Image: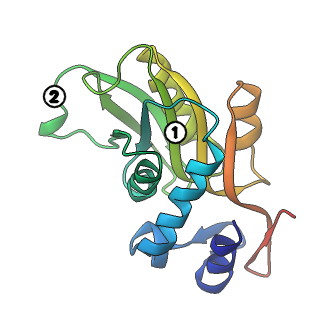
Amino acid sequence: MEELKQRILQDGLVIDNRILKIDNFLNQQIDTALINHVGQEFARRFKDVHIDRIVTIESSGIAVAYAASLALNNLPIVFARKKKSLLTKGEQYTAKIYSYTKEEEYTATISKAYLHAGESVLIIDDFLASGAAAVGLTDIVAQAGCTVAGIGIVVEKTFQSGRKTLEDAGFRVESLARIARFENNKPVFVE
């Protein structure tokens, strides 16, 4: 998605040639026009599959999932929580996930009330690197007896193993901006 790539080049910050910081338009402040276009692009790419609901993970995936939902005729969205709270009582689907940027493991949870066996689920996330978050979400979806219609990723680091892990497990992955490498703290995109 050319608009997204240009925005990454213009406003993204690469740290230590390994981490891309895009909090000025996605991960903290949200450029709603751009994110709406991202949602429309996911709708275009997944128009050939039946989707009952969207699953994402807090917090950066929520805005993107919302934009995709609007473009896909207002599908329901469920997001996995990363921390337990008084509100996460009751039966939960869980998966342990290692965070690349925070360098820690957490347990993602979704209430069993929000995923229903037999549903077709589109997973949306902001980044794909090692694939840990997406794998954790596919595990939760499987625990619920649902199928994964596809996985939509805003930014993929193709030099890490995430796509291979997901595709080897049989999942369709659609990424809107695919980074081949970082050079001199700038992203170089896959052609």
Residue at point 72%, 25% (across, down): 170
Image check: 86 left or right of 107? left
Residue position marked by numbered label 1 in the rendering:
123
**Residue 89 disc label:** 2
Image check: 5 left or right of 110? right
Query: x and y percent of residue 52 in the render?
Result: 43, 30
Residue at point 70%, 24% (across, down): 169
Q: Does 143 sit above or below residue 46?
A: above
Q: Does 139 sit above or below residue 98?
A: above
Query: x and y percent of residue 130 in the render?
Result: 66, 45
Residue at point 43%, 43% (across, down): 56
Which residue appears farthest toward the bottom when viewing the image? 10
Q: Quadrant of the N terminus?
A: bottom right
The 10 Å Cα crowd at callout 1, few under 14, some 14 to 19, many 20 or more, is many
SS type, badge 2: loop
Q: Nearer the viewer, residue 137 or 48?
A: 48
Asked if residue 15 can be seen in this view, the reply is no
Image check: 23 left or right of 107? right
Which residue appears farthest toward the left when viewing the image? 86
Q: Quadrant of the C terminus?
A: bottom right
- The mark nearer the N terminus, 2 or 1, is 2
State which mark lies toward you, 2 or 1: 1
Q: Nearer the viewer, residue 33 or 134?
A: 33
Q: Does 178 sit above or below residue 114?
A: below
Give the total of numbered labels.
2
Quick check: marks 2 and 1 in contact, CB under 8 Å? no
Distance from Cα at disc 2 to Cα at disc 1: 24 Å
Q: Does 75 sit above or below residue 169?
A: below
Amino acid marked by disc 1:
Ile
SS type, badge 1: strand
Amino acid marked by disc 2:
Lys
